[in-house]
């Protein structure tokens, strides 16, 4: 059986970090996820408000680096939870249990350092230490700059196995 979900949206509020009685960290937050299509009558996109729960290190990561309005990509599983409200009525809620949470945007506007912390000198440039590294230069592989990186091979087809 398969229960895998990936969603991308903006945090509706700051994550709330709590700890269980045994000290296990758990963060809960809500993502505003726009639908891919527009309403015929209004021309606007509907938004789904999806509850997410992140446990242990993932929960601590979310509570440390994500705030209201940040774009997040959540990978996890869908879970249905039954509970009783204050009036004694049985209720059911759907939530995503996050296995991984990724940054969905690159940086906040006006944030000099980038949104993820100090800049890194490990080839990540001004992306705040996160994102794709720069393309390696030939000298990164021990090839002197300006040298011919290719050499001619002898045309000896008799030794080829095909």
Image: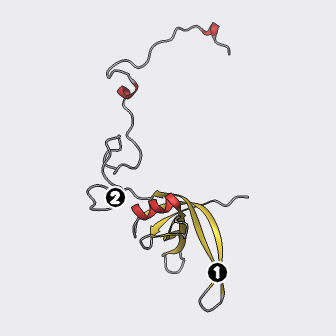
Q: Residue 34 placed where, x, y %?
A: 50, 70
Q: Quadrant of the N terminus?
A: bottom right
Q: Residue at x 34, y 20 (%)?
A: 144
Under circle 1, the secondary element is: strand
Mark 1 closeness class: few <14, some 14–19, many ≥20 residues within 10 Å = few
Q: CA distance from mark 1 to mark 2?
A: 37 Å
Of callouts 1 and 2, the N-terminal one? 1
Q: Residue 61 placed where, x, y %?
A: 45, 59
Task: Look at mark 2 in the image and give the residue it sits on.
Answer: 115
Q: Are marks 1 and 2 in contact (CB under 8 Å)?
A: no
Q: Quadrant of the C terminus?
A: top right
On screen, 101 above or below 12? above
- Residue 83 is labelled as 1
Q: Quadrant of residue 50?
A: bottom right
Along the line of sight, the residue nearer the viewer: 155 or 133: 133
Along the line of sight, the residue nearer the viewer: 138 or 14: 14
Q: Residue 155 placed where, x, y %?
A: 55, 9
């Amino acid at each position: 059986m398969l229960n895998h979900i990936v969603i991308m949206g903006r945090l509706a509020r700051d994550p709330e970090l709590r700890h269980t009685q045994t000290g296990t960290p758990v963060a809960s937050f809500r993502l505003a996820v726009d639908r891919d299509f527009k309403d015929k009558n209004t021309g606007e996109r509907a938004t789904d408000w999806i509850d997410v729960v992140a446990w242990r290190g993932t929960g601590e990561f979310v509570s440390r680096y994500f705030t209201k309005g940040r774009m997040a990509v959540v990978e996890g599983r869908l879970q249905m939870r039954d509970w009783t409200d204050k009036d004694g009525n049985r209720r059911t809620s759907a939530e995503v249990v996050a296995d991984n949470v990724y940054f969905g945007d690159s940086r906040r506007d006006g944030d000099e350092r980038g949104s993820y912390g100090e800049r890194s000198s490990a080839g990540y440039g001004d992306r705040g230490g996160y994102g794709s590294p720069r393309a390696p230069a030939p000298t990164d592989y021990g090839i002197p700059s300006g040298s011919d990186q290719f050499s001619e091979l002898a045309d000896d087809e008799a030794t080829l196995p095909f």
